[in-house]
Structures are given as structure tokens and as C-alpha cells.
Image (cartoon, coloured by chain):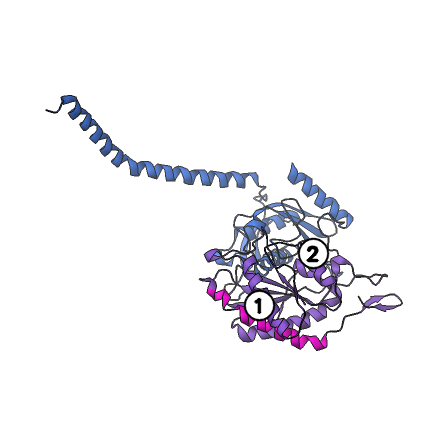
Amino acid sequence: MTPKWTVWLGGVLLAAVIAAALYFPALRRQVNKAKDLTEKTAEQARRELLPVAPVSTGDPMVKVKMFWGSRGQEGELLPVVVELPLSRDPALRAKQVLNTLLAGPVDAESRTLPPDAALLAFYILPDGTAIADFSDEIRTSIPSGIQSEQLAVESIVRTLEDNVPQVLRLKILIHGQEADTLAGHVDLTQLFRVNAKDAAGTQLDNPSPPGSSLPGPIRKAVDTVRRATKR
Amino acid sequence: MVLDPAHGGTDQGARGTEGISESDEVLQFATATKRALEAQGFQVILTREGNDNPSFDDRSARANAQRGAVFITMHIASTGLTGTARVYVEPDAPQANNITGLIPWDRAQAPFLSLSRKLGDLVQQELSKRFKGSPDTLQTAPVRQLRTTAAPAIAVEISSVAVKERAELDRMVPGVAESIARGLTDFRPTYVVPTIPVPGGSVQP
């Protein structure tokens, strides 16, 4: 005859198995939820660390052209008109339009810049040279290739050209550093001509391999960005 | 003739399905192109023959060390219409004023730009005949590899590593090799090494 305690033990074990079977799906849902929350929190923390272009409530709403990729025309940019509150200050205005460019169009396939890339800093020197410092993701998350990198740089340059006339030429830094290329193809050692007023032809006039001499004021500004990024 | 299979070593370039990596695939394209060019009587060297990754300057130096060289850097994109190919040359750039007759390394491509465009046009025409959807005309882009190359220099970019199966890229190999060989054969009679303007005369590089 089976001892009474074994029946009790069997009953308890059976109850435990049934309880576990009922609880397991709920537990799995909670784990997945916690995982999503952790990922979101990391992304939120990263974004909180990034400087946000200040938007004052007094900024007037302005229709601007953003240059994103054209779905119909392979390798081409298409101007899209959007309405934004834009500062009159050229550097703030440049940050606002570049952040909008980075945020991307409604149609994700028309993106020219990676969704996780961020603008870390933007300065305009008195001679019209601008310095844009992007986070590492602009290099690590962009699809590799001449066409995609060229499209990314062109979208930045043309958006600035159309909306911030004070910017005549542009130097692109990645995380405060001068880079040889964007992601292995397009040359970032040069200054990109942004505005036709820069008739002297700065593009490639002063190619500046990392570590070599840039024109004095630009070198000073690049060094300032580099020091600020290291801090 | 210097053929440059881009990337290599730890830099795999674009990566696609089926473990396709740009650095492996371009080596295959470059090797086939070398054979096609040699069949036309060209002397050809590759900037890399294995899975190493010479610097941009080392690759340019292979062409710059020789008189009358032509340089083609080969790439496979991760975007673009599958089964197409594009040719890129450097944008216009002012030549440096110099009194030495030497070409500044950082602007080595400048004196060769018109020759690069001529070569690029010929190769692009051949590519567009073979690969439907490819552009009819060459593109310009500031490709880092081209800037320091003192020779007619173009970049050929094939789309793309995002093919459904590797065989789709493999099928493009003979057509790309043949297009480059034909373009170069047409270019050869027009290739005269340009002179570098210096005060009081001009010199050849």
C-alpha cells in the first residue's frame, strides 16, 4: 500500500507543475517586456546625452527644403518641403535642419543618413566655413558603397545650401575627429563646397589628410571640437 | 594597368546574404578582369592578391611608381539596382601651382582628370550595353582612393551584395571584365601622359 505522505507529495508536485505551466507564459511576457524596456532605456539615455538643437517658442515656422533620396530615381536626391520652427541664428538654424534631415522622411526607404546617427556639434566660422561633427553611427550604420556615401554627403550639403546661406563650405568630422573617409569610400579630408558664392573653389583646394595642416582658423576650430568631444 | 580590389583583411566592405563580402567578391572580379586585359596585351598588376588590406596610399603608389599607368579601383555596393554597374571619377579640382614640376601627392589626380573622364566614359558605355539599368554616363564622387593616384583613374562600383544568391554576382563577372577590357582598348590610343604646367615651361610627370 502506498504511504499517505507519498500521495501528498505527488499532489504537491502535480500542483507545482500545473502552476508553473500556467505561470510560464506570463513570465515570458514579463521577461520580453523587461528586455524591450532595457533597450529603449539605453537608446533614450544615448539621446539624452546628445545636444539637442534649441528650439525657442519664438522661432517662426518656415517652409524648408530637405534633400532625401528619391525612390523613383536611383542615386538621386529629391527636395521635400517641410515646415519647421527655424532660428534666425545660422548655426542654430543649421542644427535644426540637419537634425530634421537625420530624423528622416516619412518614407524610411528615402533616408540618406542612418537613423541612429546624431549631430554632436555644429559651428560656423566667420569666413563661412562650417564644421559639422556627427556621431560614430554615421560611419558604422551607413550602407557601405560609393553611391550611398555620396548621397549622404550630398543630402547634407544641399540641405545646408538651401536653408543656411551663410554656410559656404563644410568640414565633416566624426566624433570630433578628422576622418579619411565616411565609410571607406567618400573622401572626408576635403572641405565640401556648399554655396556657389564660394567661387574660389575650396573643394579639394585644401585636401587635408588627418593630421596634416588645415588652414589656420579651420584647424583651430577642428581642434576645439576634438577637445570638446574628448571631455 | 593597376587593378585595385578594394577593402581586404579585417575590412570586408559591404556584406550581404549568404556570407557574401565585398572584399572577397571584388577579388574575383579583379582576377577575371586581369585575365581579360592580359588577353588584350596589357600588363596588369593587382594591388592585392589575397586577403590583405594595403592603405589607400600604398594602393595609389603602385600606379604612381610607373609611367603611363592606368588605375581602376573595383567595388561592390550594398545598395543600388541589382545587376547594374557605375563608373565614378573625381570631381573637378584646381591644379596646384608649383614650381617644381612634381605632382603634390594629395592632389595627384588633378592633372589626369580629363583622361580619367575619357576612360570612364568608354568603360561606362560598355557597362551600360551589358547591364540593363546602368547609367549611360559616368558619375562624379570624391572617392578617396582616386585622389592620390597620378594616372587616369576610375572607380567601378557594382550593385550589389544584396543579391538573393551569390550566383547573380558571379554571372556579372565576365561582363564586367569584358567591359573594362574593351573600354581600355579604346582608350589606349588616346592616352598621352599630360604635362604639368610650371613657370617657364612645362614638364611631364
Q: Magenta segment, which residues?
A: B167-190
Residue B138 vs A116, above or below: the answer is below
Rendered image quadrant of residue B101 = bottom right
Chain B, chosen colour in render? purple
In the rendered image, residue A100, in percent from the top left (x then y), is placed at 55, 51
Whether residue A187 is visible to the viewer of this picture, yes or no, is yes
In the rendered image, residue A131, in percent from the top left (x then y), is placed at 67, 49
Whether residue B134 is visible to the viewer of this picture, yes or no, is no
Question: Who is closer to the viewer here, A18 or B5?
Answer: B5
Look at the image and tell me in which quarter the N terminus of chain A lies: top left
Q: What numbered label is drawn on residue B32?
A: 1
Q: Does residue B174 show up magenta in the picture?
A: yes
What chain is the blue one? A
Q: In the displayed structure, does residue A110 sit left or right of residue B106?
A: left
Residue A178 vs A192, above or below: the answer is above
Q: Does residue B61 show up magenta in the picture?
A: no
Q: What numbered label is drawn on residue A184?
A: none
Look at the image and tell me in which quarter the C terminus of chain A lies: top right
The reply to the same-chain question for discs 2 and 1 is yes
* Residue sticking out furthest to the right: B200
User: What amino acid is found at the position of numbered circle 1 in the picture?
Assistant: Ala
Q: Are marks 2 and 1 in contact (CB under 8 Å)?
A: no
Q: What numbered label is drawn on residue B58?
A: 2
In the rendered image, residue A72, in percent from the top left (x then y), is placed at 50, 66
User: What amino acid is found at the position of numbered circle 2 in the picture?
Assistant: Asp
Q: From the viewer's perspective, is the residue at label 2 or at label 1 nearer? A: 1
Rendered image quadrant of residue B149 = bottom right
Q: In the displayed structure, does residue A78 sit left or right of residue B54?
A: left
How crowded pointer 1 is (Cα within 10 Å; few <14, some 14-19, many 20+) is rated as some
